[in-house]
Structure formats: structure tokens, C-alpha cells
């Protein structure tokens, strides 16, 4: 499906239609509607516990909506079995909040893991692809080190190399700069932009870092009370006269978000 953004035809890569999700007694998502365009970087912001990471889990099929649809390309993944979801997941890379590296594996083995899971056994091919992926994040010289020897920022960069090694259509980022110093944050932001520009990867980024959001986003979606309250460019968000939006992005106390 195509849509029109700023006068240009945009292909919708991921579409959430009326997503509702209850977790225990909490109604986390209350009719989320969101279109994510192919090749864009969209940032999800909102209060802690507001459903941002839950949305990422719906996109990967780790959670299924109580009602509504998750459409990737032209396929409703909400009804797929695990075999069908496995095919969809091959098109999606994920950067988890803590990096989620395997401490028992070397850096190279961690990055190679998605390829091995898909059946790649040729050592030369694996080595070439792992080296290239690590070179993109500036860590090729660390290929034989263990994750515990790396800083938090370096571990995030290794996780990004692992997320993109199989050349996915989309990468989902869950708090990619959480706990990082400003230099490491800038490095991760630059890599997200690079993945988009050089490879046309669609990026969905969950973050509480408004500076990072402004830097990387083509559009920002603000979740409030279980639905998308606002979706637009960083400039449109900054120029909004809505007090709810202004209070949130400027860190001012307000009513329950």
C-alpha cells in the first residue's frame, strides 16, 4: 500500500490497525493505529510503561493483539503460526535494550549467530560477512574478544552489527542509547542514520532520549493513554502548541500520560 507524505508517494512497510492489548489488569494498547513507511526512521516516545516496547513485540509477532491487525508488507501476521512468523522474522532485525549478547560467545560468534540460525555453515562466508558487519560499526579488531571486555556503547554497536548482518528490511531498536554517555549515544545515532541512508533500512526506535529522537527521526509518534496521540516530523512536534506535547518533550510535570 502507498501513502502520501509531503507530496511524495510512500510505501507502507508496517501497518498497525486498531491494536488493543491487555496485560493482566492493564489495558496497555487501546486502539493503536500507525503506518510506518519503507526506508524511514520512526521514533516512538511516551511515558514509561505506555506500550512502546509492547508495540515492538507485536511487530515481531512475540505478542499477538487481542484485537486489530499487524500488517507487514501485505501480510497480516496476527494470524500466522510460528512457521509463518519465522519467515517474517527473517526480514526484521532487533536491537534489544541491553544488547542481549551471549557472554559465552565471542564477538564474532555473536554477530554470526543470525546467519548460523538460518543454516549458513561456510566458515569463509561467515567470516567475511561478520568482518564486514563489524567494520561498519568500527569494531572489526574486536572480533575475537568476549562481550564482557567491552564497554556498554561497544556492546550496543556489536548488537547492531548482529541485527543488520542478514540485511533485514527493518530494524527495531528498544532504547538503543539507554545508559550510554553522550559520545556513545552520538555514535549509535550516527549508525542508525547510516543504516537508513546506505541500506534503505526501515527503523523503528523506542527511546526516552529526546535529543536522540530529534537527531534520527523522520517522524515521531507520541503514545499517550494507549494510543497514538501525535505523529509527525520533529519540526512539527517542536512547533506544536498542544500543552500535552510541549510538557512531555520539555520534561514538565503534567496529568497522567
Image: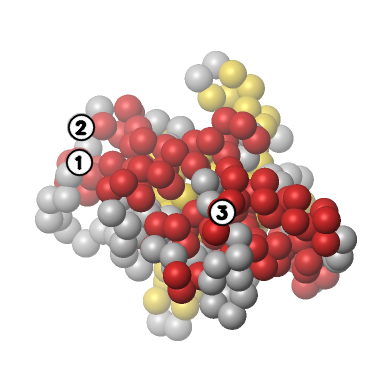
Which callout, 1 or 3, points at the residue further toward the start of the chain? 3
Nearer to us: label 1 or label 2: 1
Which callout, 3 or 2, points at the residue further toward the start of the chain? 3
Q: Which residue has dot 3 on it?
A: 141
Q: Is residue 121 above or below residue 189?
A: below
Quadrant in the picture for the N terminus: top right
In the rendered image, residue 180, in percent from the top left (x then y), is placed at 32, 57
Which callout, 1 or 2, points at the residue further toward the start of the chain? 2
Query: Which residue is rendered at x = 58% and y = 51% of the image?
Result: 140
In the rendered image, residue 157, in percent from the top left (x then y), is placed at 49, 54
The answer for how far apart the CA atoms under marks 1 and 3 are is 44 Å
Q: Which residue has dot 1 on it?
A: 246
Nearer to us: label 1 or label 3: 3
Q: Residues within 10 Å of mark 3 (few under 14, many from 20)?
A: few
Q: In the orientation shown, which residue stands out farthest toward the bottom?
A: 24
Q: Residues within 10 Å of mark 2 (few under 14, many from 20)?
A: few
Q: Which of 3/43 is in front?
A: 43
Whether residue 250 is visible here, answered yes or no, is yes
Query: Which residue is rendered at x = 35% and y = 68% of the image?
Result: 49
Callout 3: SS: helix
Q: Are marks 1 and 2 in contact (CB under 8 Å)?
A: yes
In the rendered image, residue 248, in percent from the top left (x then y), is placed at 22, 49
Query: Which residue is rendered at x = 28% and y = 48% of the image?
Result: 182
The answer for how far apart the CA atoms under marks 3 and 2 are is 49 Å
Q: Which residue has dot 2 on it?
A: 241
Q: Is residue 21 above or below residue 185?
A: below
The answer for how far apart the CA atoms under marks 1 and 2 are is 7 Å
What's the coloring here? secondary structure
Query: Which residue is rendered at x = 17% and y = 44% of the image?
Result: 250
In the rendered image, residue 47, in percent from the top left (x then y), is placed at 29, 59
Callout 1: SS: helix
Amino acid at each position: 500500500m502507498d501513502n502520501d507524505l509531503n507530496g511524495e508517494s510512500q510505501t507502507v512497510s508496517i501497518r498497525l490497525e486498531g491494536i488493543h492489548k491487555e496485560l493482566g489488569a492493564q489495558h496497555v494498547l487501546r486502539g493503536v493505529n500507525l503506518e510506518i513507511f519503507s526506508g524511514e526512521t520512526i521514533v516512538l516516545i511516551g511515558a514509561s510503561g505506555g506500550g512502546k516496547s509492547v508495540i515492538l513485540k507485536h511487530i515481531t509477532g512475540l505478542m499477538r493483539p487481542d484485537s486489530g491487525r499487524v500488517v507487514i508488507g501485505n501480510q497480516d501476521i496476527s494470524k500466522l503460526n510460528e512457521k509463518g512468523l519465522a519467515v517474517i522474522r527473517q526480514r526484521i532485525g532487533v536491537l534489544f535494550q541491553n544488547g542481549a549478547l551471549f557472554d559465552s560467545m565471542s564477538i564474532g560468534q555473536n554477530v554470526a549467530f543470525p546467519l548460523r540460525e538460518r543454516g549458513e555453515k561456510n566458515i569463509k562466508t561467515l567470516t567475511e560477512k561478520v568482518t564486514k558487519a563489524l567494520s561498519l560499526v568500527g569494531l572489526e579488531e574486536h572480533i575475537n574478544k568476549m562481550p564482557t571486555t567491552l564497554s556498554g556503547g561497544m556492546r550496543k554497536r556489536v548488537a547492531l552489527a548482529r541485527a543488520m548482518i542478514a540485511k533485514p528490511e527493518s530494524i527495531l531498536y528498544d532504547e538503543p542509547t539507554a545508559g550510554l554517555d553522550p559520545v556513545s549515544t552520538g555514535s549509535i545515532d550516527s549508525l542508525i542514520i547510516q543504516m537508513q541512508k546506505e541500506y534503505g533500512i526501515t527503523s523503528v526506535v523506542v527511546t526516552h532520549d529526546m535529543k536522540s529522537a530529534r537527531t534520527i527521526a523522520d517522524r515521531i509518534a507520541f503514545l499517550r493513554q494507549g494510543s497514538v496521540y501525535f505523529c509527525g516530523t520533529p519540526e512539527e512536534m517542536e512547533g506544536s502548541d498542544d500543552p500535552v506535547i510541549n510538557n512531555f518533550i520539555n520534561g514538565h510535570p503534567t496529568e497522567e500520560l
